[in-house]
Image: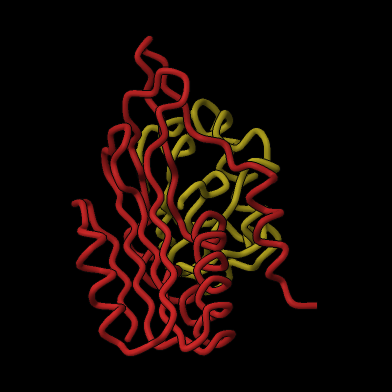
Amino acid sequence: MPLELLYFAWVREAIGKGGESVLCPDGIDTVDSLIGWLAQRGGGYAEAFADRARLRAAVDQAFVPLDASIVGAREVALFPPVTGG
Amino acid sequence: MISVRIQEGDFDPGAELARLEGLGGGALASFIGLVRSDGGLIDMELEHYPGMTLKAVEAIVAEAVHRWPLLGVGVIHRHGRLKVGDRIVFVGVTSPRRAAALEACAFLIDWLKTGAPFWKRERFADGRARWVEACASDDAAVARWVEA
């Protein structure tokens, strides 16, 4: 099943788009492994995902730590720490 | 009476306060966040995660309602382009007791900074632009609300 990815703030700017639909290969089952897989595409992806300490994630619209599972997820968002308020 | 709005346009703080005043509590506390004119800032773009923002803010409000005896809560958070001096966020709470109103108001604004999917990009008069970095003091502000 395709996974909807969303990118925000400088992650979106580095990659050059706000989101995309992907088919994850076997073994990509956590946010962390997803980030590693996307970073291998190089270019803006490598730039956006170079420093995990600066990344946060949401799975199906709930904040999660980067070691969270994405098995069965429909939507994963990747972004920097939030700065609202 | 809970009202949460995520919107591009401005809001009328007087109207929000009047709504909360009408709920019969003896204490009403409110906070308004404005765009600061730091270091030649012209304006900022507030990006958010449309599918998630409202429920993230509603979850924060639900936690406040769980912790304090509140009669009403109003939260408005804007997104889009905001100039220096523009209103960004409104938090208002009413309660029978002043301590509850003041504490719940502080809780809500602290959590809005760290628990809602917003990102600020600032633009300056000299042409620079930068994404605002989350700061450790925001995490520290929220940490004081974490129950042991």
Q: Looking at the image, which residue sits at the far front? A: B26
- Whether B31 is drawn above or below B126: the answer is below
Give how far across and how far down residue B32 sits, in percent.
Answer: 38, 54
Q: Position of B141 compared to B94: left or right?
A: right
The quadrant holding residue B42 is top left
Give how far across and how far down residue A6 sits, in percent.
Answer: 41, 52
Give how far across and how far down residue B148 sits, in percent.
Answer: 80, 78
**Chain letter for the red part:** B
- Whether B92 is drawn above or below B11: the answer is below
Which residue occupies the foreground of this view, A85 or B57? A85
Q: Is residue B22 visible?
A: yes
- Whether A10 is drawn above or below B17: the answer is above
* Position of the N terminus of chain A by quadrant: bottom left
Q: Is residue A27 visible?
A: no
Which residue occupies the foreground of this view, B47 or B60? B60
- Residue at 35% in and 38% down: A17
- Whether A39 is drawn above or below B42: the answer is below
**Chain letter for the yellow part:** A
- Residue at 28% in and 70% down: B17
The quadrant holding residue A15 is top left
- Residue at 41% in and 22% down: B129
Q: Position of B32 compared to A79: left or right?
A: left
- Residue at 41% in and 80% down: B94
Give how far across and how far down residue A79 sits, in percent.
Answer: 51, 47
Which residue occupies the foreground of this view, B148 or B121? B148
Which residue occupies the foreground of this view, A47 or A38? A47
